[in-house]
Amino acid sequence: MPEPVAEPALNGLRLNLRIISVVIFNFASYLTIGLPLAVLPGYVHDVKGFSAFWAGLVISLQYFATLVSRPHAGRYADLFGPKKIVVFGLCGCVLSGLFYLLAGLSTATPVVCLLLLCLGRVILGIGQSFAGTGATLWGVGVVGSLHIGKVISWNGIASYGAMAIGAPLGVLCYHYTGLTGLAAIIMAVAVTALLFALSRPAVKVSKGKPLPFRAVLGRVWLYGMALALGSAGFGVIATFITLFYDARGWDGAAFALTLFSCAFVGTRLFFPNTVNRVGGLNVAMVCFVVETLGLVLVGVAVDPWMAKVGVLLAGAGFSLVFPALGVVAVKAVPQQNQGAALATYTVFMDLSLGVTGPAAGLLMAWAGVSVIYLAAAGLVAVALLLAWRLKKRPPVETVV
């Protein structure tokens, strides 16, 4: 974990610009994810003639690689500093674009093309976990640990913003330039970010004996469990809201997703200092209440407006869950282990989103699509109880 800066307190526009100057690297890494996201499944299935299983696997490989590599990204950031981790991650993003380019240029059998795409996706997953984790810790090193909640919030805005911009932009680029042109654009984005990262000064790395992974996990796993339970609402809305609207015979599922995204980003922008002022666990509890109400409203909706209001509340509630719990989780370990703590904490969200889709799909097949939103509301309510218990327990002393 980088040492916090020792200069006068930052605030307002100057603080935000300092954070954005580093968060932009996370934006770039997520843009390299978003650009091919809506293109590769169709390319694998329709152009190369593979089944839907292989089309889905090409996308899923990136998330699996991110999940597996994220704890390593945090540990290496603690050891070598976040700048080196960001540079390594962006190099992975460049290499992923290179493999897409080779796949597009390949005149060999479709299997070779598929293999190149799969390799590119795995490398991208590793690259994003390093670039994203490193960018967050670099931001904390630049503005100080007092503003860690705001750094995490800006990283979330950058991530969702890049994905929202990247997907339609990638489809447009593919339409005019094909896979090779899209790959070149991905490489250009990553190389540009890499050059800017290399030109920025590094922050000092904290000295001290790191805790073993088991000890870090023991400090943060309860916060991670609350995050995982709270992420269920996001998972079912992102994955099944279209099917929910279809089952009701309504139009406007895409607009509902837009409402969720606007509520998510808007809440982070309009309440930037809430975690510092009120406290992470207090904010998390309020967020869980709002998210639960929103999910219940979606589950019992008999009119489109009820579903839209529910989605809006769920987006607003979920928005601050990650930074609110993340601040407390990171502060539960010594400074030299906070990179590993942040990465380990984030893995719980990765796992939750990976499990929610298939589990909710099985529940939907058995009980109907409305039930999955009520079930998700129940999980978020459990997260609320867990946050309340964490609030009541004595604080854990960190050993420096």
Image (cartoon, rainbow, N blue to C red):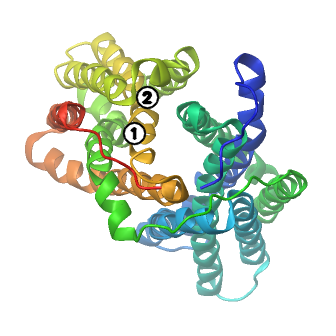
Name the amino acid type tagged 2: Leu
Q: Helix, strand, or loop for circle 1? A: helix
Q: Earlier in the sequence, mark 2 or mark 1?
A: 2
Residue at 69 percent across and 54 percent down: it is 32
**On the image, which quarter does residue 106 sit in?**
bottom right
Residue at 47 percent across and 54 percent down: it is 334
Instruction: Kindly identify which numbered label has been placed on residue 302.
Output: none
Count of picture labels: 2
Q: Which residue is mark 1?
A: 328
> Residue 330's spot in the image, x, y percent?
45, 47
> Can residue 43 be seen?
no
Question: How far apart are the alpha carbons under marks 2 and 1?
Answer: 13 Å
> Can residue 268 be seen?
yes
> Residue 255's spot in the image, x, y percent?
48, 22
Residue at 32 percent across and 23 percent down: it is 282
Q: Which residue is mark 2?
A: 320
**On the image, which quarter does residue 46 sit in?**
bottom right
- In the image, taking residue 337 as reference, residue 88 lies left or right, namely right
Q: Nearer the viewer, mark 2 or mark 1?
A: 1
Q: Helix, strand, or loop for circle 2? A: loop
In depth, the one of 125 and 249 nearer the eye is 125
